[in-house]
Image (spheres, rainbow, N blue to C red):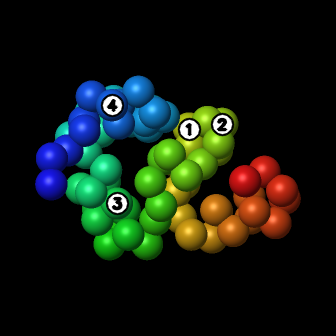
Amino acid sequence: MECNKEQNLERCNCSYEPCSRKGICCECLKYHVQMRELPACIFPDDAERTYDRSFEHFARLVQEGRV
């Protein structure tokens, strides 16, 4: 399967600039799930910038109706 990195970057809201996985969704997902996290693109921009990408943070956002 061919990666659509350039196309993915158009939608990627990851604010962590030195990230080597930016635009490579399969690598991003694998990394974050192993860390018990979700990738940046799942979060609203203001929540993403906290760098708290935990499942728990996402669940709180869902309960607040923000996701």
Q: Position of residue 48 (x, y in %)?
A: 56, 43
Q: Nearer the viewer, mark 1 or mark 4?
A: 4
Q: Residue at x 28, y 65 (%)?
A: 30
- What numbered label is drawn on residue 7? 4
Q: Tag count in the figure?
A: 4
In the depicted view, which residue is nearer to us: 33 or 11? 11
Q: Tell which circle, 4 or 3, labels the residue nearer the N-terminal end.
A: 4
Q: Are marks 4 and 2 in contact (CB under 8 Å)?
A: no
How far separated are the C-alphas under marks 1 and 2? Answer: 5 Å
- Tag 3 residue: 29
How far separated are the C-alphas under marks 4 and 3? Answer: 17 Å
Q: Are marks 1 and 2 in contact (CB under 8 Å)?
A: yes
Whether 9 is drawn above or below 48: the answer is: above
- What numbered label is drawn on residue 49? 1
Q: Tell which circle, 4 or 2, labels the residue nearer the N-terminal end.
A: 4
Is there any visible trace of residue 1 in the rendered image?
Answer: yes
Q: Nearer the viewer, mark 4 or mark 3?
A: 4
Residue type highlighted by circle 4? Gln
- Tag 2 residue: 46
Q: Nearer the viewer, mark 4 or mark 2?
A: 4
Q: Residue at x 63, y 70 (%)?
A: 56
Residue type highlighted by circle 3? Leu
In the depicted view, which residue is nearer to us: 10 or 14? 10
Residue type highlighted by circle 1? Arg
Q: Secondary structure at mark 2?
A: helix
Query: Quarter-wise, where is residue 33 in the image?
Result: bottom left
Q: Secondary structure at mark 1?
A: loop
How far separated are the C-alphas under marks 1 and 4? Answer: 22 Å
